[in-house]
Image (cartoon, rainbow, N blue to C red):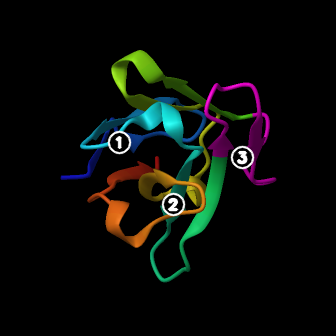
Amino acid sequence: QVQLVESGGGLVQPGGSLRLSCAASGFTLSLYRMSWYRQAPGKERELVATISTGGAIISYADSVKGRFTISRDNAKNTLYLQMNSLKPEDTAVYYCNKYPYSDNYWGKGTLVTVSS
């Protein structure tokens, strides 16, 4: 059974940092491009960052470029998102999924709240 479990979210002040993790089970992470997505209250889900199977090719949404870093550890079947210089507009539920996403792969997400 495919499962993606996101963790690492929480409440952080503007300018702070968080590191999100996404643990995959039921499939081999290394075979797929993977992405982080987020959905803010009242908004559409958006693509945040994407990483190729081996990690050599990475892309970011303009809104997070220079502040967020996506990485992966295929040996641990885990995806990461390091988020620095967080802004209130980064507040959202963050999800990991394949790229392009698969509806069968959505997890519960992890809530990131950036507020003073």
Seen at 72% across and 46% down, the residue is: 64
Q: Is residue 91 left or right of residue 60?
A: left
Question: Is residue 60 found inside the magenta-colored segment of the image?
Answer: yes
Which residue is disc 3 drawn over?
64
- Residue 34 position, x and y percent, is 55, 45
Q: Is residue 20 above or below residue 109?
A: above
Q: Is residue 68 left or right of residue 97?
A: right
Q: Is residue 88 left or right of residue 76?
A: right
Which residue is disc 2 drawn over?
38
Count the labels in the image: 3
Which residue is disc 1 drawn over?
9
Does residue 24 appear in the picture of this structure? yes
Distance between the Cα atoms at labels 2 and 3? Answer: 12 Å
Question: As rendered, which of 35 and 46 lies closer to the eye?
Answer: 35
Are the two marked residues, 1 and 3, in contact with CB atoms closer than 8 angstroms?
no
Residue segment shown in magenta: 50-66
Which circle, 1 or 2, is nearer the viewer?
2
- Residue 31 position, x and y percent, is 51, 37
Seen at 61% across and 33% down, the residue is: 53
- Amino acid type, residue under disc 3 in the picture: Val
Does residue 19 appear in the picture of this structure? no
- Residue 36 position, x and y percent, is 53, 49
Q: Is residue 30 left or right of residue 51?
A: left
- Amino acid type, residue under disc 2 in the picture: Arg
- Residue 9 position, x and y percent, is 35, 42
